[in-house]
Image: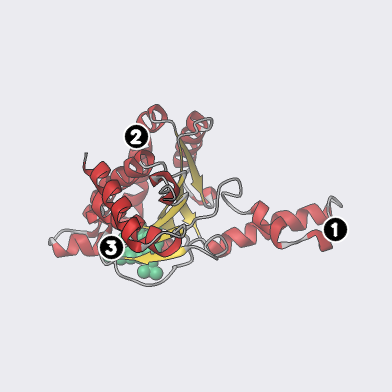
């Protein structure tokens, strides 16, 4: 009999997550929206640990979109403080776990203090190779494609390339995370079925997984369910679904251990 693939082969290389539903989670509990963001930060910790443990190469989390500036000033300022304190308190742990942190997005709009903290965290973890953790902050898919186009236009202006050399590959090479595998699985929590201007180019072939679970309730079981679903859709490796079920039970047992 043909050998079964390893669990590592079934796990996506790059998972991107739209972490939605913090506000509704808080509302359900009669609390203010920002308490949902605080609970959401806990769920981020769990998701990162899960990805690290299960051999996912890259995890990209949508933390703040370019459209989120339209929210009430108070909510924005709590979110900024939360980024700041989480960066400060978690960076050593990320480094100890060999996680390479990168902030993707237009950092220029953040306070100087936050930008400094972001840059320091990136510097400290830059040579780690355990897991690429990309935090999308002030990120928009349209912004990403625009900044890539601008870089290429500058190269044309400097006579480094010819307009004919602006190919799909050239654009892809200037996008955020060009050095990482493309996301093969997108998860969106919170029940909406849209991309909300997240990774537009990079998601061209990703499997999309939507769950109504609100982000603060996201845990290992929900993550494992998304991976199981992905493996069944995408990575059959010519196996029957019965064989896959056996393998997936194995993954879930490992997670429970
Ligand atoms: C996602 O949760 C977190 C951010 C956008 C920062 P929301 O704050 O959008 O929560 P809902 O969608 O209102 O429940
Ligand atoms: C998407 O959630 C952005 C993040 C999770 C950071 P939103 O709640 O902002 O998206 P919409 O408004 O439902 O499209
Ligand atoms: Mg939302």
In this rendering, the answer to whether 150 lies above or below 113 is: below
Q: Nearer the viewer, residue 11 or 246?
A: 246
Expressed as whole percent of the image width and height from the top left, the position of residue 224 reads 30, 53
Q: Which residue: 64% across, 57% down?
A: 147
SS for callout 2: helix
Neighbourhood count class around disc 1 (C-alpha, 10 Å): few under 14, some 14–19, many 20 upward:
few
Mark 1 and mark 2 in contact (Cβ < 8 Å)? no
- Residue, disc 3: 21
**Spatial distance from mark 1 to mark 3, Cα to Cα?**
45 Å
> Which label sits on residue 162?
1
Neighbourhood count class around disc 3 (C-alpha, 10 Å): few under 14, some 14–19, many 20 upward:
many
Mark 3 and mark 1 in contact (Cβ < 8 Å)? no
Is 223 situated left or right of 57 in this image? left
Instruction: State which tag comes first along the sequence, 2 or 1.
Output: 2
- The quarter of the image that holds ligand 1 is bottom left
User: Can residue 231 be seen here?
Assistant: yes
Mark 2 and mark 3 in contact (Cβ < 8 Å)? no
Expressed as whole percent of the image width and height from the top left, the position of residue 104 reads 51, 49
Q: Which residue: 36% across, 42% down?
A: 54
Expressed as whole percent of the image width and height from the top left, the position of residue 170 reads 72, 56
Question: In the rendered view of the protein, which quadrant contains the C terminus?
Answer: top left
**Spatial distance from mark 3 to mark 2, Cα to Cα?**
23 Å
Is 58 situated left or right of 44 in this image? right
Expressed as whole percent of the image width and height from the top left, the position of residue 131 reads 45, 39
SS for callout 1: loop
Q: Under 8 Å from ligand 1: the CB of mark 3?
A: yes
SS for callout 3: loop
Q: Quadrant of residue 242?
A: bottom left
Q: Which residue: 83% across, 55% down?
A: 157
In this rendering, the answer to whether 183 lies above or below 118 is: below
Instruction: State which tag comes first along the sequence, 1 or 3.
Output: 3
- Residue, disc 2: 90
């Amino acid at each position: 009999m043909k050998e079964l693939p390893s669990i590592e082969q079934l796990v996506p290389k790059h998972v991107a997550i739209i972490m939605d539903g913090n506000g509704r989670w808080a509302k359900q509990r009669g609390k203010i929206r920002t308490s949902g963001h605080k609970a959401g930060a806990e769920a981020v910790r769990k998701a990162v640990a899960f990805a690290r443990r299960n051999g996912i190469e890259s995890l990209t989390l949508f933390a703040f979109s370019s459209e989120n500036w339209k929210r009430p000033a108070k909510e924005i300022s709590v979110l900024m403080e939360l980024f700041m304190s989480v960066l400060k308190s978690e960076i050593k742990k990320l480094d100890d776990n060999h996680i390479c942190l990168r902030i993707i997005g237009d950092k220029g709009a953040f306070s100087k203090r936050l930008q400094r903290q972001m840059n320091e965290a990136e510097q400290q973890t830059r040579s780690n190779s355990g897991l690429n953790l990309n935090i999308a902050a002030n990120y928009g898919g349209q912004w990403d494609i625009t900044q890539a186009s601008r870089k290429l236009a500058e190269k044309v202006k400097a006579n480094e390339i010819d307009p004919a050399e602006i190919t799909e590959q050239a654009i892809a090479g200037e996008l955020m995370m060009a050095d990482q595998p493309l996301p093969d699985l997108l998860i969106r929590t919170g029940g909406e079925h849209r991309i909300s201007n997240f990774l537009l180019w990079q998601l061209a072939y990703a499997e999309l997984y939507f769950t109504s679970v609100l982000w603060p309730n996201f845990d290992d079981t929900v993550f494992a369910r998304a991976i199981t679903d992905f493996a069944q859709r995408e990575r059959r490796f010519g196996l029957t679904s019965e064989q896959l079920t056996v393998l997936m039970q194995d993954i879930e047992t490992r997670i429970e251990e």
